[in-house]
Each structure stands twice: as structure tokens, then as C-alpha cells.
Amino acid sequence: MPQEITAGSHVWVEDQELAWVDGVVTSVNGNEAEVETINGNQVTTKLSKLYPKDMEAPDTGVDDMTKLSYLHEPAVLHNLATRYGIKEIYTYCGNILIAINPFQALSHLYDTELMDSYKGAQLGDRSPHVFAITDVAYRAMNNEGKSNSILVSGESGAGKTETTKMIMRYLAYLGGHAAAEARTVERKVLESNPVLEAFGNAKTVRNNNSSRFGKFVEIQFDGRGQISGAAIRTYLLEKSRVCQISEPERNYHCFYLLCAAPPKEIEKYKLGDPKSFHYLNQSSCYELVGVDDSHDYLATKKAMDIVGISVEEQDAIFRIVAAILHLGNIAFALEGEDSSVLEDEKAKFHLQVAAELLMCDLEALETALCKRNMVTPEEVIKRSLDPLGAAISRDGLAKTIYARLFDWLVKKINVSIGQDPDSKCLIGVLDIYGFESFKTSRSYAFTALLDDGPYSALELGPCVVKCTSLKGYEELLLFEANTKCLAEIGFEQFCINFTNEKLQQHFNQHVFKMEQSVYQEEEIDWSYIDFVDNQDVLDLIEKKPGGIISLLDETCMFPKSTHETFAQKLYQTFKDHKRFVKPKLARTEFTIVHYAGEVQYQCDQFLDKNKDYIVPEHQELLSTSKCSFIASLFPSLNAETPKSGKFSSIGSRFKLQLQQLMDILNSTEPHYIRCIKPNSDLRPEIFENVSVLQQLRSGGVLEAIRVKCEGYPTNRIFSEFLERFSILAPEVLKENSAYEVIAFIFSVEENVACKSIMEKVGLSNYQIGKTKIFLRAGQMAELDGRKAKLLGESAKVIQKQVRSRIARKRYVRIQTASICIQTVLRGQLACESLKFRKRTAAAVKIQKSARRKSASRKYTNIKSSAIVVQTGIRAMVAHNEFRSKMQNRSATIQAAEEEEKDSGKEEKDIGIEEKDIGIEEKDAGKEEKDIGKEEKDSGKEVEEPEDKEPEKQPTVKVQEKEELPDPPVAVLEQNKPDKTDVSPDKEQEVTEESNELYHIVEEISSPIQDFLTAEDLPSEVEQLKVLLIGEKKRADEYQKKHAEAQELSEQRRKKLEETEKKVHQLQESLNRLLFSMSEQFSQLKTILQTPSSSKPASPPIARVDYFDNSDNSDASSTGSDFAFPASGRNSANNSCPRPKAPQVHVKDATATEITGTADSDKEGAFDDYF
């Protein structure tokens, strides 16, 4: 490579921040070169550290990195960064798919239309996608009848869980049942994800939804390729997270979902803010950005319904989760020297709630937390625990309950989904553990699997400077050796690393070892490529006997063994092993050099965590729970513990589970998806070169690219190759019978035939092995292309002959059929022609008769129109004359209207006077003369409109008649005078007008002018119609005016009648008043005439005389001092007879006039007075 680089060459040079940066070589001095980078820096480096840059590479990158012209680290990194910049997150590396987490929703990449486009497509025909890898696995399973597996790996936060969801969704699309079917197997498999994520995922330092357990999903298919069953296998749940979390992590999602439940359920479980619970408030992170816990709680319950978890079981599950939170809030205080009691009332409250939720005895729960039973040969001794021991017992109970609950959920889901015992093919999807690493700059090294361990952060002391990702492991370098470490790398991390070593070995065997071993077996010309093999690490861990797990089980069998004795045994056994390192001054720590780097473990808890046992007090407490669900999680010790008394090793059990998993993977055809986390901030559109490059190196992707491209990625046995490509060189086959051809294919000269085919095609750089032919990358595609082209040309020749024969037969059939059809059609056409001629002759006769009738009807219509026109003209002239006559009478109508107005004013005056009369009735003490005068005046005024009313009626009659728009004859009839209402003069006048109108009509009724011809009649008719319409409109207007006048007259008449009624009512009221007064005067006279000696002087005396006003109206005014005369109006409408008006005479009886002292004198004086 150095000899290719000269001045002016575009190269890649190493950079501390960007890993690799492109630049231009300015000068070359021996083995060194000066490079000007794209950011303007001048760099001097060795030629061996420079890599050429492909200036002709596409701007959008290539979808398969095996197509790169220069296959090296900077080219691969630049290609991934380029594609990530245009939101192309998937890239092939041979058969390996690299998926970069976009940290944003890209819904267009996962819709149904896109899934349909990848269905049945060959790998590479479409852009890289997780659907393409899944489709290849599905088609390989159907075509070859062999199980396949898809292994998804990568760091925590790289997107493994989401990628696994997409794989299962696409498999459900390919092998799913009808959409109408409810609760199908594939739907239950998909809905199991939310349930397992709620109880098995949590937020870690670098991932908001990190799986804290390993998961392998087996999807079973029937013979038709439809999903018939499934099974979910889980590995090593992180139980320690239930009790211990650190900033900025969270506990398992289910705790926060339950705290965000509806208020009714929160009250039921006596929950509250997550900040109030010890197991949750160890970190200040309670909510996730963009996540609604209340919505996820309802979604989780819905998923539980779909997978078959009943409502009662759901209630029991969430009661257990709430009980764990309350257990965490139980605090202990020291009592005496080594005993513990509940700290305060708050602790007692949470203890009581936990007992209620677990449905167990309150005192038994407290005893199980604070005391232990020690079994001796003689007796059972109860020992009290100090507060620290009680807290450890509390946390152990919480972890045990949660672990049992999670195992029950997995079993329930598997039972609900169901497995198909008859299925012979499956597709396995593996999603297991992710790693992160932290690195600082100096001295003391401490490695930890923070994201997957019981602790996810450290109390680092003075200085922690920088965080980077290195080979999937967590590495912390501290400035001070004596810094206290809260996150111990313990047994869980040891098992997780063991799992990743196994998976890395599987990947190495498939990509590296299998590839090179085939080359060696076939004895082809191949240069061996060294790669890191981790078999010795696996032997160090799992070898039996002599491995770490075997030594751990052996140590656990001795009751007096401690973690120090276990560590010393490791030091002695592996002191010379190159993968095992004893740290300096260490007593319980050891270091293993893994494939991805060194990890230091502390074995303080190895012995306890390897023993799979539960505290007997806890077991007995929960097995007697009144809740059947909780009791089923903790069966009795007699039913659960084997009689042999041997403990169950978690390490051995996990190794067995892992070996079973590897057996399944080895029996399937693997497909790899490497997930990459582009940045540590979990932000979109940020690509950190250093982090991505480390992930590519640790995942073996770069090695796979190098092996694939430098080797022969495609190989076929001779028989398969000849059967597939012998058509390219048919002369190499003997032109004999089919049996000889088959015998030749399987003869010892197969390699020669294969070589002849390759030479004829013109391909080189291939290798011929013992039983296989090895092709370079792209050669198989070229052979397939040439074969397809040859088959296409041959198909054209065959199609030409077949189509020619088919066309000839078709032509003959069409010709014969056309002759028959023509014969029939010609006969039908002749019949139709005859029918047409007959119909034509008949039509001529019909038209002749029709035209004659039409002409006659037209003449008749014209004649009738002329008569109508004459009649209309005559009527129009008569109307004009009549209208002119009537207009002359308008003055009379106006005079009548003025008279009506005057009468209206008089009626108003009458109303005013009637009001005055009412006032005068109230003031009865006024003088009689004034009242008589006012009555006379009112009588006169009322009589005046009655005298004028008959004079106004003839005029109204004329007005009504002159507004009518009827013909003259009708007018004459309507204008006949009414003898009862019209005076003789008016009657004579109306008669004369009628006679004049009659004579006018007779004069107009002369014949129309003779000079009008028949041609002018239509136009004249139209003009007359227009005039007639105008006359009708004017007549309608006069009718409206006449109706309005009549309505006005009627209103005035009604007003006059109302006035008369009011006057009559006033007269009757006055008469009643006078009658009442007359009776009072009579009584007064009787009283005065009664003799009484003791009475004082009498008041004024009044005399009442009755007389008839009709006899003499003047007598009332002259014969008394004041009088109330009757109304002067004599209306015929009054139905009641008028009473006689009394005449009252009043004189004062003073003391001088009545001077007598005796009763006779008083009586005589009274008589003289009257």
C-alpha cells in the first residue's frame, strides 16, 4: 500500500477525536508523509498508517460494504456515517446486517407496504433492511426444511429490543393467520413484549429501555409456513435491581406504571408518589422523556388480557408489586445489643399494608424479617437480627418474590401461546444482554458491567473525567486506589460475560473458523488469517473439572467455606493461565482477560448468590398466604426441595441453559444482525466515529469484512455447480442419453467440467477444491446473470416457434368461423333491408295524412286566434273608456275621505268629553247648571255625526264601483243604485253614467279594420296580449286600493260604534248614581221628620223631586237649585228604559229659621221648609 501513495493522493489519517479524517498528501519523505487534513491541520505520519480514499465512491455510500473498492476501517466507517446522514440506518456486510439506532421514529421504514415489497425478494435486490434478513431466514426454512435463527447483538442502547420486535412483527406478517381471528399465536407473541418489558426492562445509564434479562424466542411453523406455536426462554434476570439502583437509573418499569395507575387502583394498593418509596427514590429519575406511564399501564393490562392472564391474576400480580414497594419502606432500629425492631409508626404502617397485600399474618411477617431459626441437633433456636441483617432479610424477600413473579409470567405466556409438538421447523430470535464501558485517564483500573450488574454507577471519589465505549465492557479508572466502590462486579456480571463469550465463539466459528476450516479441508490456495479465539477463556470458565464454575460449586458444598477460601483456590489453580490475572495486593478479587478486554471481579458474594435457596422463614410465611396465587409461587419445602439434600447451583444451572441455547443455535442456520449505538447521548443525527469504530472492532464486523472479501464467500459442491451452470457450456456434457449425462455429472471429472465452464465464461481468481468450487465475491451473481441471459434467449426462440404454431391454428379457426358468421349475417342483413323498405312505404302514407291534418288544424287555429284578438281589442278599448270615466269621480272620493277624517276628529272630541263626564261624576258636588249645560253640548255633538252618516254612503258606493276592473257590462250591473242607501239625485247620476258606458261599448263593438291581413294577425295578437296583461295589472292595483279603502272605512265604523257604547255606559252609570242619591235623600227626610228632643241642630236639608225629562226639558233647570238632567241622546240602540231623573232642592236650615224649642215647632219648621 505505501507504494501507491504519492504527493497529491487523497488518504485517510488517524485522528484522536474523529478516529479517521481525510486529507491530501503534500509531500512524501521516505517512509513518512505530510498530510493536510480537511480541517486544515498538518500531520506527519508513516506511510504504513495511511489508507487510500476512494474518490469515485458514491455520495450516498454503498449498501453492501463488500462492494467497497478499498476495504479498510476508515472506508467502512465513512460509508456508515454517510448512510446514517441520509437516514439509511441499515447496511450489509456480506450476509451480516449492520443496524444503527436512529434514536427517532422512522415509521416509513416499517409499514405494511414495505413489508410486502420485501416478501420473496432475494437478498440484495432491495435496500438493506431487517425485513430482508428475516425474509431470507423464512424462505430458507420453507425451501430447505431447516430451522434458522437470527442473533441480534450489540451494546445496551443500540436498538436490539426494537430490532427484535420488528423481526417478530415481520414473521407474524409472513406466517400469520387471518386478521379476523382473535388472539392468534402471532398476536400473543407480539403482545408478550409489552408484558416482559414492563417487568424485565429498566432505564440504565445509557439506555431508557434496557433488557435486564436474556430472551430467546422460538417461533414454530407448520408445513404451510404458518405460525403454529412459540416459546420464550429467559436467562438470568437481574434481581438485585429491585432493591438497589443508582443515579440516573430507574427500577423496573412496572413499579412506576403502578404508581401512575388510575386513582381508584392507587387507593386500593395504598400507593402514592414514587418519591415516597425507598426502592424508587435512590435515584432522582422518576419519569422518562416522551413516555406516559399511565398510558403504558393501561397498555400493559391490555396485553395481559391478550396473552391470557385473567383479571384475578392481574390483581394478584399488581398486589405483589405494591407489596414489594411497601416492604422497601420498612425501616429497622437497634434494640438492645443485637436485636432490631421497627423504627417508627411509618414502618409499622408499611409493614401492615405489605401483610394485607401479601395476605399473610402481620406478626409472622415481622418475625420473618427480624429473626432467624438456627437448627441444632437438640433444638431450634431463634436468633434476632441486627438492623443491617433485618434490612438484608427484607431485600432478600423482595428480590425472591419478584424473581418468582417474573418466572411465573414467562411460564404463563408460554402456556397461553402454546407450542406445536408436530412442528419440525422454527426460527429463533435471540436478544440478550448489552454492555457499556466508562474510562478515565489514570492509575487504578477497575472494570465493571455497570449496565447489566446490580449497580449501575459508582461513588467515584475525586475525579472521573471521561466516558467512552470499549469492546462492550465497563471499565473505570480512578485516580485514587482507596476510593470506595459501591458497584461491585459480582456473580451476575460473571454469568453475563460468560454468555457473551459463548456468543462470540459462535460468531467466530460461523464467520472465521468455519470459513477457514473449509478452505483447509478443500486444500485450496489460501493464506491463513489470524483472529482472536476465545476458546481458552471458555475453558477457564466452564471446563469441568477445573473451571471457575466447577470450583465455585465445589466450594459451596463445604459449609465452612468463605469467599476468601474460594479466591485462594482460584489463585492456586489458575496462577499460570494466560487469561487469569491476580491483582496486586488483592485477597478476594480476580481478573479475566475476555475477548473484549479485561474485567476484574470481586467474589465476596459469589458463594451466596450461587446457592439457589430461599430463607425457610420466608418460604413458610408465603406458602401459607391466604392468596392462592402467592401461595402457588412458594410451594412447601417438602414439595420443592429434593430429598437428596444437595443444593442447586445457579452457576451450573445457567451453564446448562446456555449450553442448551448454543445447541439450538448450532442446529440452525444463523443470521447475524449487529446493532450499533451512534452516540452516547441517545440523540438523533449524531455519529461519534470513535464509539462506532470500537463497536465494529469488538463485534468482529471488520474481521468478517476482511475474511469475506479476501477469501471466497461463495462455494458450491461440483454436482450442484454443474447442475446449476452446465447450461453455460453444454459441450462439456456428453451428447448421449439422459442416464449418461447424469453419470457424467457425478463422475470424477466434475472438477474439469467446472473449470471448463469458468474458462468459457471468462472468470478468474476462483479456486477448485476437492469437492467444491470457491468463487470470489460477485462471481456467483455474474454466473447467475449470464445464465439468466442465456435462458432468456433460448426462451425467446422457443416462444417464437410456439407462438407461430399457436397463431397459425388460431388463424385457421378464425377463418372458418368468419365464413359461418358472414353467411348468417348476410341473411340477416337481407331481411333487415326488406323490412326497411316496407316501413319506408308505410311511413310515406302516414306522413301524407298527417300533413293534411296538420294544415287543416293550423288554419282552424289561425281563425280562432283572429276572433280572440278582436275580442281582446274591443275589451281593451272598453276598459280604457271606463277607466277615464272613473278617474273623473276621484274628486268625489277624496271629498268623502276628508269628511271621514273630520268625523274621526269629532269622535276623538267625544272621547275627550266622555273623560270629562267621568271626572264630573266624581266631583258630584259641582253645580247642577254646569252639569246640565255639558250634557246638552255632548248630546249635540253626538247627534252631528249621525246626521252626516247617510250623506257619506253614496259616495263610498261610487268609490267601490269605480275601482272594479270588470268589463263594461259587469260594471253596468254592479253600478245599479241602491234605493235604500242612495238619494234620488245620486241615483239619477249613476244611471246616466251607466248609460254612457253602455253606449261606448256599443260604439266600440264595430268590426276591426279591414286592412289587417292574416299575415299581420300574429304580431297584432302579441301586442294585444301585452296590452291585455298591462290592463290586468292595473285592474289588480285598483282592486287592492278598493280593498284598502273598504278596510279603512270598516275600522272607522268600528271606532264610532265603540264610542257610542262608551257614551251609553256613561249614561247608565249616571242614572244609577242619581237613583242611589234619591234613596239616600228619602231616608234623610224620614230621619229628619222623626221627633227628637235631644238632637242638635240639623244639617242642611235636601229635597228630591222626580220628573220625566221627555215632557219638558226646561223644567229641570228652572224648578230647582241644581239638577242632573238625562242625556239628550235618544238612541234606538239603548235596550234599557231610562229612569226618571230626580230633582234635588237643598236649603240651609239655620238657627234663625228653626227657633222653636218644642218638637212640634221643629216639625212645623221642617214642613214649611219643604
Image: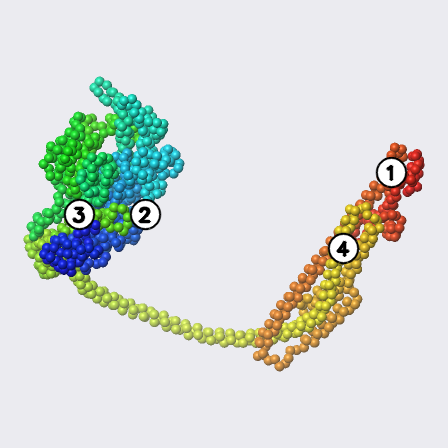
Side of 524 where 426 appears, left or right: right
Q: Residue drawn at (27%, 32%), measured in percent from left and top?
A: 399
Q: Quadrant of residue 1007?
A: bottom right
**In this view of the protein, which residue sits in the foreground, 718 or 197?**
197
Sooner in the amino-acid sequence: mark 4 or mark 1: 4
Check disc 3 and report the residue beneath it: 697
Amino acid at pointer 1: Ser
Looking at the rendered structure, which numbered label has been put on residue 179? 2
Badge 1 is on which residue? 1098
Image x and y of residue 564, in percent = 16, 30
Residue 958 in the image: x percent, y percent? 73, 66
Image depth: mark 1 or mark 2 in front: 1
Q: Nearer the viewer, residue 910 or 1100?
A: 1100
x, y (%) of residue 800? 20, 65
Residue 327 drawn above or below residue 430: above
Three-letter amino acid code at disc 2? Ala
- How many neighbours does mark 4 have within 10 angstroms: few (below 14), some (14-19), or many (20 or more)? many
